[in-house]
Amino acid sequence: MIIKKESKDNLNENPDLAEERNKTTFDPFKLGNFFWQGQLLRRKEILSYVEAQGAELCPRVPEVFMSRMEQMEDVARLSVAMANHAEKVIDVFKPEEQFYFNSLICGFNGSPFHLHLIMAVPAMINSCDDDQATEWLPKLLNRELIATYAQTEMGHGTNLRALETTATYDPSTEQFILNTPTITATKWWPGALGKSVNYAVVIAQLWTNGKCYGPHPFWVQLRDLETHKSLPGITLGDIGPKLGTPSNDNGFLRFENYRIPRRHMLMKHAKVLPSGEYVPPLHAKVGYTSMMYVRSMMIYGHAIYLAQAATIAIRYSCIRRQGEIKPGAGEVKVLDYKTQQYRLLPVLAHVYAIAFTGLYINQLYHTVIGDINAGDVSLLADLHSLGSGLKALTSWQITRGVEQCRLACGGHGYSDASGLPSIYTMVAGSLTYEGENIVMLLQTARSLMKVAAECSCVTDNIEKIKENEGKMKNPITGYIFRKPTGSSLINENSNVLDYLAAFEHNSRRLILSAFEYIQQQKKLGRSAEEAWNEAGIHLCHASKAHTQTFMARIFSETIPKIEDIAVRHVMEDILWLYLTYELVHSSVGLLEEGFLSSHQMSIIRKKLFTCLDRIRPNSVALVDSFDFTDRELRSVLGRKDGQVYENLLEWAKKSPLNEHDVRVLPFHEKYLGSAMREARKKREEMSKL
Amino acid sequence: MIIKKESKDNLNENPDLAEERNKTTFDPFKLGNFFWQGQLLRRKEILSYVEAQGAELCPRVPEVFMSRMEQMEDVARLSVAMANHAEKVIDVFKPEEQFYFNSLICGFNGSPFHLHLIMAVPAMINSCDDDQATEWLPKLLNRELIATYAQTEMGHGTNLRALETTATYDPSTEQFILNTPTITATKWWPGALGKSVNYAVVIAQLWTNGKCYGPHPFWVQLRDLETHKSLPGITLGDIGPKLGTPSNDNGFLRFENYRIPRRHMLMKHAKVLPSGEYVPPLHAKVGYTSMMYVRSMMIYGHAIYLAQAATIAIRYSCIRRQGEIKPGAGEVKVLDYKTQQYRLLPVLAHVYAIAFTGLYINQLYHTVIGDINAGDVSLLADLHSLGSGLKALTSWQITRGVEQCRLACGGHGYSDASGLPSIYTMVAGSLTYEGENIVMLLQTARSLMKVAAECSCVTDNIEKIKENEGKMKNPITGYIFRKPTGSSLINENSNVLDYLAAFEHNSRRLILSAFEYIQQQKKLGRSAEEAWNEAGIHLCHASKAHTQTFMARIFSETIPKIEDIAVRHVMEDILWLYLTYELVHSSVGLLEEGFLSSHQMSIIRKKLFTCLDRIRPNSVALVDSFDFTDRELRSVLGRKDGQVYENLLEWAKKSPLNEHDVRVLPFHEKYLGSAMREARKKREEMSKL
């Protein structure tokens, strides 16, 4: 029934896409509903509401046609309109509904409320004690205060301990005095800080009674609520244009003896008493839960961005024709080329692997927060370690994936008409923000080396062995304790387990050999820190492999949960593509060690190619099942109806440069036109002589 | 002496950079002069001239602070000024001086003259017969006519045979009639076509006497020379914004029964006589020499862009401090991290490999053109094959390299203050323009498969063997005919030859196995074309390896030509880094086959790490030797004096968003400010009730 409705929407469907959709072996609605966790109809409801509001919730013109200032104006308009409608249609406490609603209206280039919702409000929820929450949260949720999260400084990113901004407690007035002692201490990058927000959660080094207790969060008013002017003692502004997200006014912020009341330190965990006495938190890393929340949300978000790019590139690859395969039979759809399938279908596999992992880590986050509130911090380190590695690996995967999608669209991928440049320039930031990726991998490695230290004494004594048996049960690191086999069991009939064993072998090998390398370096007389630095590249490889192993396992465990047989079958193809593709691209060490043979490599590669063949007919249906509307994709190439070329010309005609006759444009007659005319006259005069 | 002068320029030098410069083991001027082929002093002369002109040759404000329209206006102003000064300071017939002069004044985001100089003029030189050259070239060089090269169509890129634009000869009027028969036939992408040029070299399907002779070049007036309005029968405009190069008005163009005289067909090679009789060219691919010229120029250009990115990232990595290696010793320069060295120093090695290869291919191009003019087309196919593979491989290397440089700068790499986003968004286009990379690799593969077919019959008969001995001498493909050895000779004391042998082995293996794979597919009943498609991924791997082998050889052969011993020593380190890094990243097949052992891999990796250690102290001097000025780099992070942080704040303050009080900005009070105030009042009224 739903399939019929879709085709009614697509009366004007490009026959090349219709042909693809007719080949489908499963019901895209069912897969979509699985992907969106049963919320597909809910999404359609939200969409209908938004579409019914017409121009009020639409950008004035496509964002890319506007200057930065125009984009900021339009997104401010849309954000306020969005806020006014929100409660009428979405459950504002469900992040997935917020995210969808936001992306339908504001796109993903950032709205003034984005950081407010995704960072400032969660940080306040996690850091305010009860009285503070009662006082401030209603105003934040009401959006009369709009806040950002100000942690990063110009000279200090992921090394929080080195932050320079100070909050010094003055017991005589019961105030903290905020200061920016150097240029490098300037707060730098917080989203919407430049012009939009009036408050911020500021992370500063807490000093009291002459002692520094490290970075802590403070709730700081930045601007006058009436005039929106910055308050005395505060200097702030926009940090200027960036690779992407033009409508985000990432800002800078400096304090000069700026005073805030003692109770503006956020006191859920650590406290400073009126006397200046410091009361430490339950667990040192409890203060980092806001960062962990954002990272856990980011991973699923990554999958969605990559799914959008894949939708655009796969649809367009079934419309674009180039070159012949059978002479005389006409140009073929570019997705019929093996090279194009090899470029795009693994991207699709990554979407699912990242999405399923994102859902897992999200649940883990909520478990951990629940535990912390109940006084149990035992899972916190695991979450921190896993979240760091996943943030790094998935942001690389999506950045590379989006770029592959762009390139798969040939020249048109470079045009903003494809929508892909905006996705790329936005996701490219995720390699660095919320923790630079190499630092992230090294954080994961830190915990892996602790595990390796435990492993390496496996044979020491009976007690140790028993302890290790317990550790084997840990769902994240247990495999590291298992005894390695000499060679892989992979053959033509292997099931998923033989493949997972190969990932685990690779990861275990890299973890233990990085550990060994560090020991060797120490034996050469290097300090622990120097040895760690020397082993940096080994450690990154180990963390990547460990994270990859985790993702492969979560993906494998998710597929059997799909009830519909036809959907499960196609998803099994995707899983196998994922496993074979990832293994081929991580096989160096396994070959070097003799764990995989040349024959086994042939089997894996052959299986990979078979997967491409099997997935090819379902490709368009697979991306259709993500259920993105043209409104969200903002792409002429990715249009659901496939009417690409006519609309490409229409889109180009709207380019602001085409609005006026060329003689009216400021640059032409004044410079080029007159220069050409003068050159001609000069030559003509010369030739007369 | 020169070193002293440099330090006088740098009175305000950041001590962290000074420390680096003091560690240098060679004279950067000598390396720079080698890199710029003896033209380093000449460059400094040109720079002095440009700097002496002051504001006339400077952008009004940094480009990234301007809207697209403002950028176009400013670059038009600069282009005309540049043209007026050109003959006073540079030799306009030397492309390297043109390129440098252009990059000093207009940056690299494109000027209206860029395509004119790099494509239209060379295309005219290569395609006009003598009379045509006499008539049009003076006007082109005089810039009273500004032209572009219009080949790509909306629906047709690298498959030239499928172009749809037609030029039909009408013998009754001795005219060609140009038509755009479909939407997909619309010319799309030519640079500066949208608003700036008034002429174009148009590639169209030539029809005469009822027969189509394939794509040929025509010289077409597009706009009225007085009014600059498009002529009747012509529709053109800007194609809209893109990932990068905002100041380039890439355009679209449609013809409707637009007539041009017969002699506007460019007739150096093929001709149409007044009767309509077609006279074919000497060699079918002679018409492609313009494309070959651009590709041969692109490769060296790629090296320069990558060198700029490397300069920025390496200087900044010696200023940025983060984390401690020795506890208590303070934060270290990030370039002291092994992970950072592994990220950046191989990029530097790629710069040289690409530059030296670019110079070689440039010379080869001029040789080939000379030969063609003398009636010899024997090297044309070699140039075409090599140029295609190099275009693909080097554009990937620089795109990945620039992105690594951006990421190595952490968050600030994402800011336009780093200059890296502009470089990235520009070079990212090179993966597609002038031939989509996968198609380029498959073109190289086409010629490699011909070689493989000759190889595979090596043992057939004595004559064949003799023939193959001759073929072994071909400097580009000769190695493929040599007999493979069973295992690599690489050991601790290996010289370059053992490494080159490994590259050759890898490439030969991939070429022959792709050939085998095609034969297998044919035996399974597939047509030649289907088998070719099935083997697409194998063919791409083979082409990449072949091109990589060529680059490694050219790089190796270049180093001994360096006369200065200290410079040669540091460049040997760079060469070894290149060879080991590339081999580690291409080792899968060599391991799988048993050509390389695990022990040999350890040797190669160890040598790679040793190179990082050896190059680290010379890093800043190496990038200094490229001799880029701050004017060219347009980067706060890459400043020669290293005064990064103060200038980052100054740069941000100039962001247009900071020019006005926030209340005056169009978006704030109108939307956000009033929404916040209303929300507050509503809550306050509610609480009164």
Image (spheres, coloured by chain):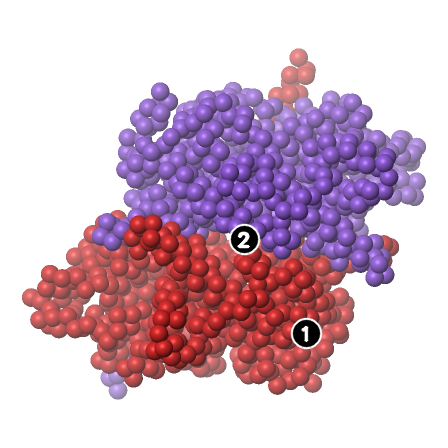
Chain colours: A purple, B red
2 or 1: mark nearer the eye: 2
**Is A444 located above or below residue A685 in the figure?**
above
For this orientation, the residue located farthest to the top is B689
Query: In whole angstroms, how far apart are the C-alphas of marks 2 and 1?
Result: 29 Å
Quadrant housing residue B642: bottom right
On screen, residue B21 versus residue A344, left or right, reads: right
| Left or right relative to A543: residue A531 | right
What secondary structure is found at the residue carrying circle 2? helix
Quadrant in the picture for residue A22? top left
The amino acid on which the numbered mark 1 sits, given as a three-letter code, is Asn
Name the residue carrying label 2.
A598
Which residue occupies 48% across, 71% down?
B483
Q: Check contact, mark 2 vs mark 1: CB within 8 A.
A: no
Residue at 33% in and 56% down: B157
Pick the front one: A115 or A427: A427
Q: Position of residue B564 (x, y in %)?
A: 64, 85
